Amino acid sequence: MLEDRTSHAVIAVVLRAREGKIEALLAAAERGSGTLEAALAKAVDVSLLAHVEQLETRLLGSGDLGTAYLGLARAEAPLGGTWVPVDRARELSRDDAALVAVAQARLRAKLSYTNIGFALAPLCFTLSELREIYVAALGHDVSATNLQRVLLRRGVLERVDGRREPGRTGGRPAALFRFASQSLEVTDEFAALRPPR
Amino acid sequence: MLEDRTSHAVIAVVLRAREGKIEALLAAAERGSGTLEAALAKAVDVSLLAHVEQLETRLLGSGDLGTAYLGLARAEAPLGGTWVPVDRARELSRDDAALVAVAQARLRAKLSYTNIGFALAPLCFTLSELREIYVAALGHDVSATNLQRVLLRRGVLERVDGRREPGRTGGRPAALFRFASQSLEVTDEFAALRPPR
DNA sequence: CCAAAAGTGTTATGCTTACACCCATGT
DNA sequence: ACATGGGTGTAAGCATAACACTTTTGG
């Protein structure tokens, strides 16, 4: 006899940084009897995501089970669908709004102790451009000066040859940087209680 | 027509600290059509856990879906079942061993930036006793001196009246402490990129 | 020459670690 | 007295934040 089972949806919560704002794209797919990754791939083109990690599993308002994944995409990734600025997430369904909040919180936390910015920034960028992404994701001001020093010191950023030409308004040409690694790495593991040397 | 669906298990991975070691207790229950919390409660007596949080959802070796929860229990909690020291987790099934590893990693990480120790320590304890728990969970030596200063500075610990009498071998009586809060709190949110004052 | 944007130098601050030293108790 | 376990004082190390100042460009 078959039991009474709810169905299982896999939900992609994709975030990107564009024009000083974080935007979210939501997409879901039924899992059926396959793997979680296969269902996620049905929901969204995973090859366009620079980073993916599981967020949480919860019972949705529909009564179905939902497993949400956080996806991060670069601004230029050609991901179709309805992108919603996260400051208007309240216009989404209750479930979707909650998932966007969880995704945002995860991103914020990891920005401070990992290299996760690589998944939002273009491959090559100026420090001002990177700063704009951090400001959007963290929701507070960030000094470009100190951002540079922190990330260079940790070995997260590398200089790239060449400079960005200034715009019409002038200004010194900006140096170009890239992330040293394109996969998630914890760069500041323990704030306290470090293992003894 | 009913689809081909796998069943959904909720798995409790309970950790406790005993005699300088971290031990794990694994228990699972079918979710059926109820909530995740209800299934967790079928697997383990949740009222004996000092802290619970979701770990991850994955496809188990059996082909079933499994959602794992981390539970933390105090050493004296009367939780029956087979407790396995985590350094012998490899004797468990592949799935169980992997879940224990994830649980341990989550505990380790949170020990450094939250008050999560409250869920493993007794309500009242000496600093040496707390140190033993941290050493067991972190896997490296911890100085009682510095542990005290870090946790007091953060407001995580509070002094309690009275002292612990020394044992037969003598020694100065130890001061007693308790955790200021019995629910999870992030006490050291950002190592870097703090919001400006 | 001035405004704008980027980058560097320098200092101050705060938290953590390391370690020497002092305290209280049993034998 | 001395061993043992507990606690405090102090200094050093290190990363970050703050901010003044310099560099490089366009108009």
Image (tube, coloured by chain):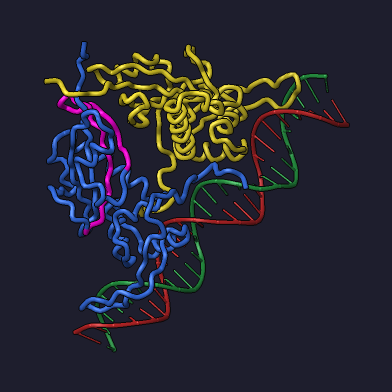
Chain colours: A blue, B yellow, C green, D red
Q: Looking at the image, which residue is at 46% across and 35% down?
A: B105
User: Magenta stretch: residue A6 in it?
Assistant: no
Answer with the quarter of the image where residue B72 lies: top left
Whether residue A195 is situated above or below residue B135 in the rendered picture? below
Whether residue A146 is situated above or below residue B162 in the rendered picture? below
Whether residue A3 is situated above or below residue B173 in the rendered picture? above
B146 on left or right of A76: right
Residue stretch in magenta: A53-76
Answer with the quarter of the image where residue B181 lies: top left
Q: Where residue A56 appears, x then y in whole percent?
A: 30, 33
Which one is in front, A197 or A138? A197
Number of dots carrying numbers? 0
Dominant SS type (magenta): strand
Q: Where residue B27 appears, x then y in whole percent?
A: 41, 18
Whether residue A156 is situated above or below residue A86 in the rendered picture? below
User: Magenta stretch: residue A73 in it?
Assistant: yes
Q: Looking at the image, which residue is at 16% across and 33% down?
A: A94
Q: Where residue B68 appears, x then y in whole percent?
A: 37, 26
A174 on left or right of B191: left
B68 on left or right of B1: right
Q: Looking at the image, which residue is at 15% across and 40% down?
A: A90
Residue B178 visible from this viewpoint: yes
Which one is in front, B63 or A145? B63
Residue A100 visible from this viewpoint: no
